[in-house]
Amino acid sequence: MFDEARRRKERGQDVVVGALQQEVQAEIQAILGGLEVIPTVDIEGVPVIDVPAILRRHPQVCVVDGLAYDNLWGRSTHRWQDVEQLLAHGINVVASVNLQHIDDQREAVEKLTGKPVSETIPREFLSTADEIVVVDAPAEGALPELSTLREMALVLSADVIDAGLQRYLQAHDLEPAGRSHERFLVCLTARANADRMIASARQSASRFHCDVLAVYVRPSNASGAELKEMDEIVANVHVAGARLDVLEADDPVESILRYARSHGVTQIFVGHSMKNDWRTRLWGTPVSRLIRAAEGMDVRVFPH
Amino acid sequence: MTHQTVGGRLKVYLGYAPGVGKTYQMLDDAREMKARGVKLVVGLAEPHGRSDIRDRLEGLSAVPLKPAVGRAGTTEELDVDAILQLSPEICVVDELAHSNPPGSPRQKRWQDVQVLLQAGIDVLTTMNVQDLASLSDQIWQLTGLRVRETVPDWVFQQADEVVIVDVTPRALLHRLERGVIYPPDRVKSESERIFQEPTLVALRELAIRQTAQALEARHAGRTKPSESRAEKILVNITADPSTAMLLRRARRVADHLQAVCIAVYVHSKEESAAAHAEDHPTVDRHLRFAENLRIETEVVHGKDRAQTLVDYARKNGVTQLFLTRSARSNRRWFPGLDFTDQVLQQASEMEVTLVAERSRHGRAASPYPEDEAGALMHAGYVKVSPEMTVEEAIAEIRQQAGQVEMIYYAYALDETQHLMGVVSFRELLSAERSRRVRDMLHSDYVSVLEDADQETVAQLLAKHRLLAMPVLDQEGRMLGIISSADVAGLVQQEAGEDILKIGGMEALDGPYMEVTFGQMVRKRAGWLAILFVGEMLTATAMGYFSAEIERAVVLALFIPLIISSGGNSGSQATTLVIRAMALGEIRLRDWFRVIQRELAAGLVLGTILGVIGITRILLWHSLRGTYGPHYGVVALTIGCSLVGVVMFGTTAGSMLPFLLRRCGLDPASASAPFVATLVDVTGLVIYFSVANVILRGILL
């Protein structure tokens, strides 16, 4: 990060350092020689970014080492909120953060390392980053835990990059040319084996590191019993943590496809259609209609 | 995945575009290792004319490159033997996906690297995420680029370490602008495609995910060998071109799920020998492709394809079946039950995944759309260098013979894979041994672009009586060959389809005896019903002329004669025109010449029929006196009507295919019965109009 700060400075940008870690390595010390530092204010032993001083100075770029600090007392309670303030005033911020300080990663990291983490920043804040850089170093012959942490950091960065890509495409009114990651859609009906489908989707999703969406298509003429059964499934889905939308439609195939297309789905999970009468023989089952119409998406059919 | 363990350790520096700094970082690490006292050599590192990389190379011991065999010394390649002799601990080899020029001991650099690893040497190497074979569909979708030089996934997975070399796309674009990545004079056709922000962002995301997956696969393999439910994926191999995409997709899914992946081709016993022979080379190619992806293959025999496939899956404990959607199902009259439905019905206890082709901006999908030349292409052909002597070239052919599929011609390529010319084996074998290949090359070779349609390819091969033809990309680089054997099946298949359509039917999906009775009836009933409804118009027309018929019943006797002559002449013209179109003899713009010819032909043919008709009436009348007192005028009416009806028939019949092609439809669906129906109705109108003119005041 400090290397980048140095390069920006060399290219003529106005760079200041807004926060440093307590112990500064010799290498960084050398770079710091060429940079202006606005020191943090010490409040009850906690270093807090001197926001007013930086705003007065109003540089182009402010470097913040250690984004996840909590301010005991200050303008905001967390350092990332200070950073938000700088951003709001048009100052670019380059900041560093460790994986365990991202709120939705903390638990998993704690489990791996056994060390409790108290200070976190919200994932949503990280996702608004214009750019994210993984500082990756292979853990040569090291502990498997380290390699897992590295993997988590990579997946997190990929997700942030993807969020940025979606913003970019939206802002420029572009259609994505293709999918750089997977997204699964589980279609539930009263008869579908919802547990197995959700479990399988979640397992695949964890391997592909991707999201799972779920829809329940409520036929417009659903019976009371069907609705009740469905409510149970819906409750289970919520327990499993997937997002569930209810589609109300006469033609389930059409509404599922519309939903899938608008949500950038790459694979649709559906239950096997059991019906086997003359009508399905002649016209095909809803599942085979779905398969034919699902252009560009895979369809995975599950047994009952 | 567990693969054979090799001695050396492989470390891959993975990037997402040229210029992210893979080589730089690799050399940086190499310097560090060297400083630690490791015995390290640089086998090959491409400075790309960049001074910062040259600086990094300073102080590292480089193994001299080896000029490629039989060459003027323009390209230099990795000298594997020299490295083996030095036997260092670590060797640096840049650009893993590189293809070696013709004449090298191994075709691909990754194969060279395998040799080093097997000798116990650790290798540091670089590649981009788009070089991964299984990603090629996704890369094509994202960038529109068809990656030529790929690395099989198992080679990448073999890596003990993967380092992502990351830089933000904006920084990369900045580097590009400053001319750091490409020297300013280099043609930037590729860079224009991928050096766009959203594309770079997507590629970067892909590279990071790929690295994460590589990490996960490795520690999953280390910590829990087969703790979770073992998934087993079965891929259904067919002759359909989408099979390649299906296999790549299955490979990817299997790698992510740490599943076993197998592929099966079901050889249906009842399939006609001819149909099998036709599919055979394609199926073989798909089986080999699967093996390249390290997917185990098997050919099973059975009566019913779907049943056999599902039985095999059940016996082998398969948890997931991978199929492509049947491409034809969209075009059918009645959806009915196709292969997919049959499998779904029978495999009711398995998960079945129907893989869709990924399209790019609505354009037809993955690497090669079904009817483009590329879909038929073989990548295995004999490459020689123009600088070789005949003797060297023959030796080269002998060496490559095991790896290439068919051998008719040798293709001379320059360093950039551009095709310089072609020479036949016959010419090589009969030439003086010391002659240079360069002097024997035919540079006026016939070639096709990768996106040429297959009909064009077939026509060109037939026209020039060639055994094989090279396929080039837009920049003239050689991609592969298409042999006449590849298209022979195709032409037959297409002709068969056309003939069925001419007959007012759609192609049955399989051999006649194998198609079920119900399917056959369904396919035929649609057409018959439409034609039947069309023919009802004849009743309407006759009703309109019922007064005339009542007054001159004799006219009714000739109705079948008149309308069938019109129908016959129309069908004849349609068939001739469709065939001429299929063979490329006539094009859309020739319609006016065709109409002139057909009018004249109609006139002559009508006159001939008219004369026969008149003769017959006169003859019969003189023998029996059947046709009443006005038989002469009746005969004239018949004669004139025949001329009119036949002329209308030939022109309408010949123009309908043009009309359909103009509307973007397949002219072969202008089935002859359709023309016949049209001409039947108009024929009646012509007949009675002529009768009205000639017979008014006499009979009417």
Image (cartoon, coloured by chain):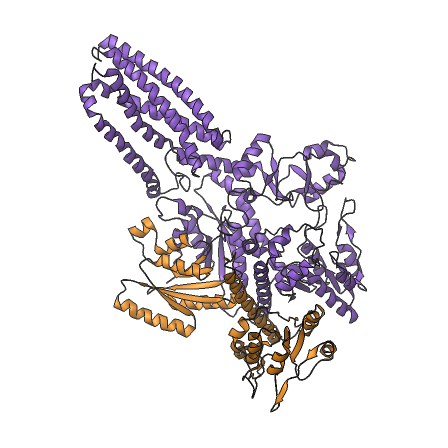
Chain colours: A orange, B purple
For the point 43% across and 32% down, the residue is B658
Query: As drawn, is B510 to the left or to the right of B99?
Result: left
Question: Residue B648, position in %: x, y?
Answer: 36, 24
The quadrant in which residue B96 appears is: bottom right
Query: As drawn, is B621 to the left or to the right of B481?
Result: left
Q: Up-down: is B665 above or below A147?
A: above
Question: Residue B353, position in %: x, y?
Answer: 45, 57
Q: How many dots with numbers?
A: 0
Q: Please tell me which residue lies in front, B677 or A288.
A: B677
For the point 51% across and 31% down, the residue is B584
Question: Residue B666, position in %: x, y?
Answer: 43, 37
- Furthest-bottom residue in this view: A44
Question: Does the rendering let one see residue B590?
Answer: yes
Q: Please tell me which residue lies in front, B494 or B222.
A: B494
Query: As drawn, is A37 to the left or to the right of B515?
Result: right
**Quadrant of the frame with the N terminus of chain B:** bottom right
Question: Residue B100, position in %: x, y?
Answer: 70, 50
Question: Does the rendering let one see residue B343?
Answer: no
**Quadrant of the frame with the C terminus of chain B:** top left
The quadrant in which residue A236 appears is: bottom left
